[in-house]
Image (cartoon, coloured by chain):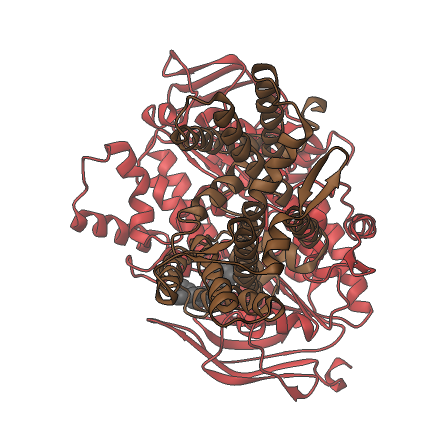
Chain colours: A brown, B red
Amino acid sequence: MKSLKLDYRQLPLLATFALFIMMYAFGSTRYTGFLSTQVFLNLFIDNAFLIIVAVGMTFVILSGGIDLSVGSVIALTSMVAASLVMNAQLSPWIVIPICLLVGSLIGLGQGCLIHFFNLQPFIVTLAGMFLARGLSYLISVETIAINNPFFDFMASSRIPLGDSFISISVVIALVVVVLAVFVGHYSKFGRNVYALGGNEQSAVLMGLPVGKTKIMIYVISGFCASLAGLVFTFYMLSGYGLHANGLELDAIAAVVIGGTLLTGGAGYVAGSVVGVLILGIIQTIIVFEGTLSSWWTKIAIGALLLLFIVFQRVIVIRSKVKKSSVT
Amino acid sequence: MQEQKTPRLVMEGITKEFPGVKALSNVSFQLFPGEVHSLMGENGAGKSTLIKVLTGVYSNDEGTVKLEGSPIHVANPLEAQDLGISTVYQEVNLCSNLSVVENIFIGRQIMKKGRIDWKEMKSRAEEVLARLNLTIDVTKLLSSYSVAIQQMVAIGRALNVSARVLILDEPTSSLDTDEVNQLFGVIRKLKDEGLAIVFISHFLDQIYEISDRITVLRNGELVGEYMTKDLPRIELVSKMIGKELDAVSSNRDEVAKKERGEVLLEVEQLARKGSVEPFNLDLHKGEIVGLAGLLGSGRTELARLLFGADKADSGEIKINGSKTKLNIPKQAISKGIAFCSEDRKAEGIIPDLTIRENIILAMQGINGVFNYIPKKRQIEIADEYIKLLNINPRNPEQLIKNLSGGNQQKVMLARWLITNPELLILDEPTRGIDIGAKAEIMKLMISLSKDGMSILFISSELEEVLRTCNKIVVMRDREKVSEIDNGKQVTQQDIMKQMAGGVV
Ligand SMILES: Nc1ncnc2c1ncn2[C@@H]1O[C@H](COP(=O)(O)OP(=O)(O)OP(=O)(O)O)[C@@H](O)[C@H]1O
Ligand SMILES: [Mg+2]
């Protein structure tokens, strides 16, 4: 039994991590210039917003739900920010809280519908997805370019890190990750999320505040989406209704590749971060390769996703077998 | 003297109707501090429903609840917990994806500086379980432990609060004698500390050992409240079932010496590393073999090998004289083996299907998906078994999740009986089943075996084993230790000695 000492809960996470190292090693040996700190840090810079969305998505998926609205919420946030800053000429200090509120409110609405009317998260957030996307076109069908000192500052300032640098967005993303790891492991709310994803009926009977937790999860996801929307806007310096099209699927893919069970109840925030980095590194490799079409990214992500879902199945089956031998 | 105390809890005129079933009608119940009060009744009498009304899982249609004199309206289990009502529900209702520590503490974790103090919780969890004499690695997932241990953990969770009322709904159904004694020790201590305890069980011995007062329900109605010491067992049983109990033929010699046919199953040196040591067994046609042993002695594991649910590493199985491999359940089923698992929640019932669909499941599996059994025939079969096993409600279209625990168990049994197997493996089939239905099931086993069916009967209730079996195989530490031919001269003591290793 000693050989089985490794907790099977952490297997997917370890596998993801190993995969990341392997891909990094592969890239480094194959392409000159790949093994530089800046290339590594660029993974964070280019994917800061995806990390933030994936963190929110992790809680949703851990609870056994799904949130399809996050991509549209990013677009909506970018539109709201752009129009308020450029058309209404409001100060960023007012615009930012409004943006965050928009996402949180959408999350709140979705959470309430899911909880009080006992609706499927898939359907509710699908509706939310269309709604948010539609709203952003309602603001404008054109791109709104942002030309504002604060946004410029956020977009262009570099925080030096040795010879290399990171952006402010990376700092924001890392703060979100640290907070989320803490919430996931050390707060009652976080543990309730796991319980909810494990067995909702039991969670009710154990006297856990299931309703509150559920609603809160979608508020968090909405908040993360709008925060990611802001970070995305810093990155793109524009608002556009087509921004982040299909991003919700990238986020879900990152979470699943990061080892969170789609059925809920098991997984880690840290895993999702590595999941995002893996998506990022695929893209980097394709860029370095130079001749490949960027659609190869999608193919690679698809293949990985399949691989991981099969892998998780195997682990679940193995753990069942293990259980029966302990009985 | 207890009469002079004020009751801690009073439920009055409780009525609860589910679509088509009146689960409780005008039931009253009172509970005093420092007493253990048993709720008794057949499967489906309304015991669990009464508890769930009290803890806010269901809302009652009529009636009032008073806690220490003041009316309370409990909307959900959380509120019940906050009022000091701590409950172990009938089915283990914990989260198996969380660790044992967490299952004990979730919802009321120990916090330190705004964060969960995992270290402290771990040691406190170990203390709580130590009270129940359970030393396990509490950081492992709950799902890595057996049903019995999960049940102990559920009890540990309930004990871990300073409650005013402690409710235990069939907490002992999968515990062995030692564990039950341990639990009773704790219950007695809590009772002396003035806790009010509700205890539900179908084991009469346990009721008489632990409880001070008994409330009997029948078909959702209150039959009466009695002091345990003033109520003889026979009277209790007839109050529960509304008539005299029609006891199982207790002519054990006749059962034991019953004719048996040729050998059906020969098992030689069958083994699986870490779960069953090399095992030999002959099973004749029309024979009932009892498999006795403590929890964890390898009984279930052996059954799983015979059914192909686990794969054997070595050894040989012969059925009707020809060598066979049983690597997956499908092979076993096609050879006429049926296995009614002890863990009905995880491996048995499909909650969202009806009684009929659940009963028909295995049979449809054998016939193949394309040989559809006409609905009319399905209903006939379902009706037949509903009558035979007295499944309540008698409506084949009721969803099984709405059945009481014992009735779900009966449906599971029916599922395998209709496949008319040559070898029926029953793993704790009478768990959670009321005394009347238990007798029915034993009678049924005996009559099936007379018709030539072989039965491997796993049970922790030695009395049942002695009543029905030709032969008793005792297991200890994953190994067969003896094989005893049944007869008048064999006593429960004899078997217990073998189970425990001759030190009783
Ligand atoms: N959610 C539900 N929907 C419909 N009917 C239900 C529901 N829950 C219970 N019932 C019915 O109410 C009756 C009482 O069930 P209950 O679970 O209280 O029985 P019980 O006395 O606990 O039996 P057991 O000894 O088998 O546990 C049963 O007829 C059952 O079918
Ligand atoms: Mg019950």
Task: Write the residue at 29% across / 61% down.
Answer: B395
Which of these two is toward me, B272 or A119? A119
Q: How many marks?
A: 0
Which of these two is toward me, A114 or B61? A114
Quarter the C terminus of chain B occupies: top right
Which of these two is toward me, B150 or B8? B150
- Left or right of B254? Residue A234 is right
Task: Write the residue at 59% across / 28% down.
Answer: A20
Q: Is residue A128 visible?
A: yes
Where residue B237 appears, as percent x and y from the top left, is: 52, 64
Where residue A279 appears, as percent x and y from the top left, is: 52, 34
Where residue B442 appears, as percent x and y from the top left, is: 45, 45
| Relative vertical location of residue B477 with respect to residue B361 in this rendering, above or below | above
Task: Write the residue at 70% across / 57% down.
Answer: A187
Quarter of the view holding residue A128 = bottom left
| Relative vertical location of residue B316 with respect to residue A278 in this rendering, above or below | above
Where residue B286 appears, as percent x and y from the top left, is: 39, 29
Quarter the N terminus of chain B occupies: bottom right
Task: Write the residue at 61% across / 41% down.
Answer: A45
Which of these two is toward me, B309 or B394? B309
Q: Is residue B272 visible?
A: no
